Each structure stands twice: as structure tokens, then as C-alpha cells.
């Protein structure tokens, strides 16, 4: 296979599979970052430290997902230019993306360090977890610039059809992270800070390796001196597309933060159960939502080439793939989730085990709605329909707020488990209506002889 894929030519099924497999592996390994920290902490320290690592993830992930959303949005513009075979526009889009990412990572890092303690207090963090949680997450936030460099490099490489290089860099850094986790926490006894430092160092190496590869292997697309003079219109296009993708992920995570506050009120055992269950769900979810990343590149390149017919064909194929995968994952979860979450949490506490098992089984039953959600949301972003995905994300936020206020107090942890599935069904319905309207519009334009 070539170092990059042209998604505007060839079998959509083959292209989608070839492009997605490295992203799936990359996302699984990305989850191993968190699982590695949590597992080492639970093994060498205690359940409170394990819960602290898990509960801070919703805060740090909000910042990380905002960065990833922005850079994924920048990648849409680059992929569109690649599909149109406009090399000069590719270089300018990369120059603009680098500038905007530098500004973003400075702002988010400073904001995270200033507001993290008030945020954890607002989330009703149990007193016995607060000190560990702050110690851990502050170091993670200080590593946000490296996360930004990696995500920008990875999303730009994917927009040019290279989904393998980000995977290779990530695998190397995760191996390094796990080795340092054991060294810093288990051998040197640095406590929970040791796990955070291991992640910090590993991500720094990963980000620079990925950026260096892109610079040396895609020199024809690297900005020249004149390309850094990006116009206001191009900055505006980059910023609005990045903002749309970033807000979409950020809004969803704000809802998750609010929901975490409700979880925290249920006590340390439930926090640990949710941490263990969420670790497994995140891995299984990565097998589904990565097709959304693929569709962002696939759709953006084909929009640049004016191939709406290939976009519709790709959506049908990707939806069929995730539906089959969802059926397999449901069977897997009901058979093995109990043993897996017990291993992750390193505990024989029956309250933790039972709640973690409940959470994973409820969530997995709604994966047939989750797969189309990711595909349609990223497809609509790729074709330039920014508002419908954003509205669907606001809806998810609303459902999580209502759950924290009413459903969780009424049903306890079962209410938490039902929250996201309810929002998935509602969002997928809205996105399906939006996608059908886009399909009808493009067919009508083609019949009138105006393109597509």
C-alpha cells in the first residue's frame, strides 16, 4: 500500500477498511494509555488512587477532545484541497492549522491549570480522592501542548490518506509509557504523579516523532515562506470548521462532566465501578467511532473531487460494517465483561464488580444506534453541514444534564448507564433526517445538470 490513500478512486469498501484498521488499532492503543495508568495505580497503590485517575479523565478528556476536534476540522479543509488536487491550498491550510493550533494549546493549557481545582470541587469530588486527583491531572494538563502537536500531525496525515504513521508513533509511545508506569510507580514509588509523568514523557516523544515524519515524508505539502501569509478568508474557514468539530466534542464532554458530578455523589465504590466499566466501553467504542474519522477524510476528499455519488456509497458501506461489528461486540460483552472489569479494577469488591458489569451491558446494547451516529455526524461535517451535528451534540448535553438532575437521583447508577444510550437514539434520528435531506438535494442538483 502507498504511504497515502486517494479516497476518490477505487473500491469504497476496500478504502474504508484499509484506512480504518490503523485508526482502530491506534485508538485501542490510545485507550491503553489510560488503562495502563489505572491498572498500575490500582495494583501498586489503592482503590482511591484508581478512582482518582478515572474521575479526572472526564475533565482532561474535555480539553483533549476540544483540541482533537479543532485539528480534525483543520484536516477536513486539507482533505478537501487534496481531493481537488490543489497543492497550493493544501500548503496554506497546513500553515493556518499550525498557527491556530499553537494559539489553542497555549490558551487551553493555561485555562486548565487555573481552573482544574475549582472544577473538581464543583464536581463533588470526595475528599479522600481530591488530593490524588489534582496531583495527577495537573501533570496531564501540562502535557496538552504535546497532545496538540500529535493530534494536529495525525489529523493532517490522515487528511492526506496516511492513517498508519500516527499508529506506529502511538504504539511506540504506549510501550514506553507502560514501562515508565511500572518504573515510576512500582519501583521508584513516585505515587500517582509517577503515572502522570510517564504519560507526559511518552506523549512528548510520540508527538515529535509524528510531526517529524510528516515534515520529512510529505515535503511537497509542507508550507513554503509565502504560504504562511494565510488570508483572513482561509483562516476563517479553518477556524469555523475546527470550531464546529471542537464544540461538538466539547459540548458532549461538558455533559459528561456534569454527569460525573452525579456519579461522584454515589460514593467511591461507584466511582471505581464507573472507571473500570468506562475503560472497557471506551475500547469497544473505539472499534465503532473510528469509522467516523475515516468518513471525515473519505467524504472531504470526495467533496473536493465533486463525487457525491461515492459519498452516498461510502456511507452505506460504513453503516453496514459498524452494524455487523455492533452485533459481535454485544455478544462479546455479555460473555466476558465481568472478568475484564474485575481485572481492570484489581478488586474483589462485589459492589464495584456488579455496577461495572451493569454499566457495560446496558451501554453495549445500544451500539447499533451509536455506529450510524458517528458515521452520519462526520459525513455531514465533511460535506459542510456544520449545524446539524452541532445541534445533535447540544441535544446530548441536554440529556446528560437532565439525567444528572432527575434520572440518576431516581434510578441511581442505572440512570447513569441509561443516559448516553438515550441520547444516542435521539441524535441518530436527527442526523439521519439531515443526511437524507442532503442526499435529496445533491440528487436534485445532479438532475438539473449543475454537478455532483
Image: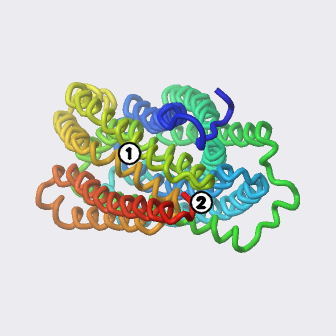
Percent position (x, y) of residue 361? 21, 38
- 436 or 256: nearer the eye? 436
Q: Secondary structure at mark 1?
A: helix
Residue 33 in sight here: no
Callout 2 touching callout 1 (CB < 8 Å): no
Label placed on residue 109: 2
Label placed on residue 54: 1
Percent position (x, y) of residue 116? 48, 61
Give the residue furthest to the left. Answer: 410
Residue visible at 68% across and 30% down? Answer: 2
Residue visible at 35% across and 38% down? Answer: 320
Residue 422 position (above or below residue 386): above
- 30 or 36: nearer the eye? 30
Q: Going from the N terminus, do you reach mark 2 or mark 1 first?
A: 1
The image quarter in which residue 119 lies: bottom left
Circle 1 crowding by C-alpha within 10 Å: few under 14, some 14–19, many from 20: many
- 363 or 2: nearer the eye? 2
Residue 379 in sight here: yes
In this figure, what is the number of numbered marks?
A: 2
- Mark 2 → mark 1, Cα distance in angstroms: 20 Å
Residue 58 vs residue 403: left or right?
Answer: right
Amino acid at each position: 500500500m502507498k504511504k497515502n490513500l486517494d479516497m476518490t478512486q477505487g473500491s469504497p469498501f476496500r478504502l474504508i477498511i484499509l484506512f480504518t484498521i490503523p485508526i482502530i488499532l491506534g485508538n485501542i492503543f490510545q485507550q491503553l494509555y489510560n488503562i495502563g495508568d489505572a491498572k498500575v495505580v490500582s495494583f501498586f497503590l489503592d482503590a482511591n488512587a484508581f478512582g482518582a485517575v478515572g474521575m479526572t479523565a472526564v475533565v482532561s478528556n474535555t480539553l483533549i477532545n476540544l483540541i482533537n476536534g479543532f485539528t480534525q476540522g483543520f484536516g477536513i479543509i486539507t482533505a478537501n484541497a487534496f481531493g481537488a488536487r490543489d497543492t497550493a491550498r493544501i500548503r496554506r491550510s497546513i500553515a493556518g492549522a499550525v498557527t491556530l493550533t499553537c494559539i489553542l494549546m497555549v490558551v487551553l493549557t493555561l485555562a486548565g491549570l487555573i481552573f482544574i481545582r475549582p472544577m473538581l470541587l464543583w464536581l463533588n469530588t470526595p475528599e479522600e480522592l481530591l488530593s490524588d486527583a489534582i496531583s495527577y491531572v495537573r501533570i496531564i494538563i501540562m502535557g496538552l501542548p504535546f497532545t496538540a502537536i500529535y493530534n494536529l500531525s495525525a489529523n493532517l496525515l490522515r487528511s492526506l490518506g496516511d492513517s498508519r504513521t500516527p499508529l506506529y508513533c502511538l504504539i511506540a509511545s504506549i510501550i514506553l509509557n507502560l514501562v515508565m508506569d511500572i518504573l515510576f510507580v512500582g519501583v521508584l514509588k513516585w505515587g500517582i504523579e509517577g503515572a502522570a509523568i510517564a504519560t507526559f514523557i511518552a506523549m512528548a516523544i510520540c508527538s515529535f516523532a509524528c510531526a517529524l515524519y510528516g515534515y520529512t515524508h510529505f515535503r511537497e505539502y509542507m508550507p513554503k515562506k509565502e504560504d504562511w501569509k494565510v488570508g483572513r478568508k482561509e483562516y476563517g474557514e479553518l477556524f469555523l470548521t475546527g470550531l464546529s468539530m471542537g464544540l461538538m466534542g466539547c459540548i458532549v464532554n461538558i455533559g459528561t462532566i456534569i454527569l460525573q458530578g452525579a456519579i461522584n455523589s454515589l460514593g467511591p465504590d461507584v466511582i471505581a465501578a464507573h472507571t473500570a466499566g468506562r475503560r472497557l466501553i471506551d475500547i469497544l467504542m473505539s472499534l465503532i467511532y473510528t469509522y467516523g474519522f475515516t468518513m471525515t477524510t473519505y467524504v472531504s476528499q470526495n467533496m473536493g473531487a465533486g463525487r457525491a455519488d461515492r459519498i452516498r456509497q461510502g456511507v452505506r458501506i460504513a453503516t453496514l460494517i459498524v452494524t455487523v461489528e455492533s452485533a459481535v461486540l454485544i455478544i462479546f460483552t455479555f460473555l466476558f465483561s465481568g472478568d475484564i472489569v474485575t481485572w481492570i479494577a484489581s478488586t474483589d469488591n462485589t459492589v464495584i464488580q456488579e455496577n461495572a458489569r451493569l454499566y457495560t451491558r446496558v451501554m453495549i446494547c445500544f451500539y447499533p444506534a451509536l455506529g450510524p451516529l458517528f458515521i452520519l455526524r462526520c459525513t455531514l461535517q465533511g460535506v459542510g453541514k456544520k449545524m446539524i451535528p452541532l445541534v445533535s451534540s447540544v441535544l446530548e448535553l441536554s440529556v446528560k444534564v437532565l439525567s444528572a438532575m432527575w434520572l440518576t437521583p431516581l434510578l441511581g447508577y442505572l440512570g447513569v448507564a441509561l443516559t448516553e444510550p438515550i441520547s444516542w437514539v435521539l441524535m441518530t434520528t436527527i442526523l439521519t433526517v439531515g443526511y437524507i435531506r442532503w442526499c435529496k438535494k445533491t440528487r436534485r442538483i445532479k438532475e438539473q445538470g449543475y454537478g455532483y
